[in-house]
Amino acid sequence: PDRYAVAGNPVAHSQSPFIHTSFAEQTGQALVYERLLCPLDAFEPTLRAFAAAGARGCNVTVPFKFEAFALARRHSPRAELAGAVNTLRFDEHGWWGDNTDGLGLARDIERNAGRPMAGQRVLLLGAGGASAGVLGSLIACRPAALTLANRSLDKAEALVHSHHSWAQAHGVSLSAATLADCEAHAQGGFDLLINGTSASLAGAGVPVQGQVLRPGALAVDMMYGPAAQGFLDWARAQGAEGRDGLGMLVEQAAEAFCLWRGVRPETAAVLQALRERLN
Ligand code: ATR
């Protein structure tokens, strides 16, 4: 069977092997999916050895998504826009780099949560790797307005700048703000808030005022498990619908699977199995 893996550091708790093995069983694809722990200073040699052993591709997770971008000879437009790669296919004539995180997040919001983004007002918190990876795909959903809010304004401005033409082409009003003044962009409240900060890992609360949300808004954290609990509690306290990043995880995996195998797996049952497994 063809070999794939999730490459990162750490990878011990990655759910990707479970997800891709479930997809393979469901679609009748013969593949094995492993965990590839890469030393922080040896991402490239570890991947090259894996590819040389006959592997066909890998997913890339923290902290190697930018290095993976540099290793790919060719990129999908969405990876180009993000400057980061979460999926590599080891093509013979050079590695192909893609980024399926944003599409995964958008699918989870629009299909699984039933909240189409077209015409909506969206607030994305954070301007690090997580937000950079998804911004282009969020814009492609054509919200009316998208505010990117970050603790330090310069990083939000840089991302807004690099996505300026893309936003214009999609008719999206894209702006940068600090966390402190994104309330001023709310105009009656955002319909959708997405948390791409790592504030919870730093033990901090949700770094924005609850008043930024309109009643009944959807608030999505890109994290899942215990790291997302504080955010989900906060969302409920604001009268919003809270959602963790597990759906995004399964949907980005489905897109990667499709890129490798040319078959699109069903995600609903796998997401449900994953929730039961983690409870
Ligand atoms: P990742 O790849 O997970 O996005 P990152 O690139 O280090 O990690 O980015 C972390 C993001 O979380 C940044 O937007 C960071 O804000 P700054 O750019 O101002 O540093 C944000 N962040 C981390 N801790 C935070 C906190 N306690 N409050 C608010 N924002 C925080």
Image (cartoon, helix red, strand yellow):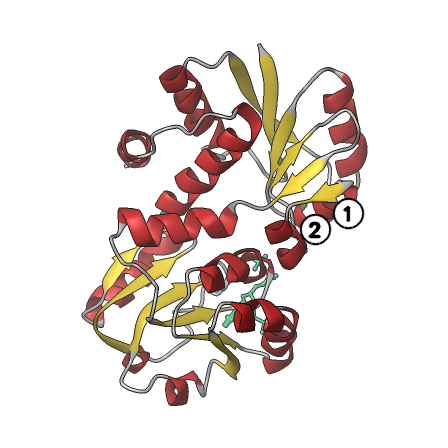
- Residue 223 position, x and y percent, is 42, 52
- In terms of depth relative to the viewer, which is nearer, 90 or 223? 90
**Image quarter where ligand 1 lies:** bottom right
Identify the disc placed on residue 50.
Answer: none
Would you say residue 74 is visible in this rendering? yes
Q: Which residue is depicted at the point 24% across and 53% down?
A: 114
Residue of label 2: 66
Q: Amino acid at mark 1?
A: Ala
**What secondary structure is marked by label 1?**
helix
Q: Quadrant of residue 259?
A: top right
Q: Quadrant of the N terminus?
A: top right
Query: Is mark 2 in CB contact (under 8 Å) with mark 1?
Result: yes
**What secondary structure is marked by label 2?**
helix
Within 10 Å of the Cα at label 2, are there few (<14), some (14-19), or many (20+) other Cα atoms? some
- Residue 87 position, x and y percent, is 60, 38
Residue 259, above or below 74: above
Q: Amino acid at mark 2?
A: Phe
Residue of label 1: 70
- Residue 222 position, x and y percent, is 43, 54
